[in-house]
Image: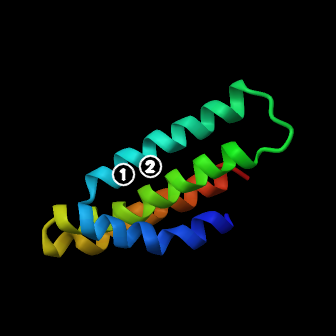
Amino acid sequence: MGIIAFLKPFMGMLSDKIGRSKPIFLGLFLSAIGIFLMFYLYIYDNYIDNSFFSIGVSAVTAALTPLASELVEKEYYGITIRALETIKILDSLQGQ
């Protein structure tokens, strides 16, 4: 969780510079590597797989909200952001 909080501003700046889709795809790929390491390799200290997963999540979440605001019309911006935040909350509740 600390890695996500630390890297999210930097990933947001990166997505501003290089575009939204590249950090999202990179983040999804890194998260998939982290999940693969978590479930298919037994590592006593899960620092490596948690790091991959956290870097991926920070890249995706930092770029997803601005991408959504760019894709929808102005009058649907609020409901789109609320839907994304609801999905994030439900996802975090499911993991606990």
x, y percent for residue 65? 34, 66
Vertical side of 78 occupied by 61: above or below: above
Q: Amino acid at mark 2?
A: Gly
Q: Which mark is residue 24?
A: 1
Question: Residue drawn 45% across and 39% down?
Answer: 29
Q: Which residue, given by chain and number where applicable, does mark 2 sit on?
A: 27
Sort mark 1 into few (<14), some (14-19) or many (20+) by Cα contacts within 10 Å: many
- The kind of secondary structure element at disc 1 is helix
How far apart in space, not on screen, are marks 1 and 2 (Cα)? 5 Å
Question: Residue drawn 40% across and 61% down?
Answer: 84
x, y percent for residue 7? 53, 68
Count of all numbered marks drawn on residues in the image: 2
In the picture, measured across the screen, residue 8 lies left or right of residue 67, that is: right
Is residue 30 visible from the viewing direction of this image? Answer: yes
What quarter of the picture does the N terminus occupy? bottom right
Residue 36: quadrant of the picture: top right
Comparing 95 with 17, the one in front is 17
x, y percent for residue 22? 30, 51
Question: Residue drawn 24% across and 72% down?
Answer: 77
Tag 1–tag 2 contact (CB < 8 Å): yes
Vertical side of 24 occupied by 67: above or below: below
Q: Amino acid at mark 1?
A: Ile
In the picture, measured across the screen, residue 87 lies left or right of residue 6, that is: left
In the picture, measured across the screen, residue 96 lies left or right of residue 15, that is: right
